[in-house]
Amino acid sequence: MSGSAIQNARILVGECFCRTVGYAVADAFEYALNCHCSNCRRTTGSAFKPFAGIARDKLRVTKGDDGLMIHGDATGHNAHCRRCGSLLYSVVRDGAYVHVAMGTLVDDPSIRPTAHIFVGSKAPWVSITDDLPQYEGHVVPR
Ligand SMILES: [Zn+2]
Ligand SMILES: [Zn+2]
């Protein structure tokens, strides 16, 4: 990636549970959502996955590149730490975007999740207690 791609934004860092893999991403996310789909629940082991979307060239793996376990192909995959299993980010939208698993961010991003998506497949034991809008399925990002 070119250095110029992120020069105008604050840089956030993130890392996996065992700290083998680290990344840097511009604090310029275009959207952030809480996804309740069963895939996100399974890949994270959580009730839902808060993720933030940004153009792929604005994220750079800064350490432990060779420690990544990629599940999927070049145009769509989940990137986990091979050692501890943390889901760090997903490459989506034909490889153009990454969805950062917000739980792996060390720094506080400017953006906050603005909606719950795929609440149609929400875990029955979870109650959404905030006032964010809820969508049965996907929301097409702007
Ligand atoms: Zn790790
Ligand atoms: Zn999902």
Image: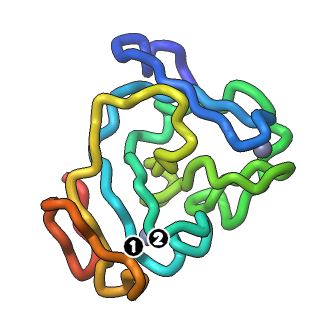
Residue 109 vertical position relative to residue 7 in the rendered view, above or below: below
In front: 8, or 49? 49
Question: According to the image, label 1 marks what residue?
Answer: 36
Which quarter of the figure has residue 125?
Answer: bottom left
Residue 89: % across, % down: 57, 49
Q: Callout 2: 10 Å neighbours few (<14), some, many (20+)?
A: many
Q: Is residue 93 left or right of residue 68?
A: left
Residue 98: % across, % down: 48, 48
Q: Is residue 81 left or right of residue 135?
A: right
Residue 142: % across, % down: 19, 52
Residue 67 vertical position relative to residue 25 in the rendered view, above or below: below
Is the residue indicated by label 1 positioned so its CB lies within 8 Å of ligand 2?
A: yes
**At 61% across and 61% down in the image, what residue appears?**
77
**At 19% across and 71% down in the image, what residue appears?**
134
Q: Callout 1: 10 Å neighbours few (<14), some, many (20+)?
A: many
Question: According to the image, label 2 marks what residue?
Answer: 47
- What's under tag 2, amino acid-wise? Ala
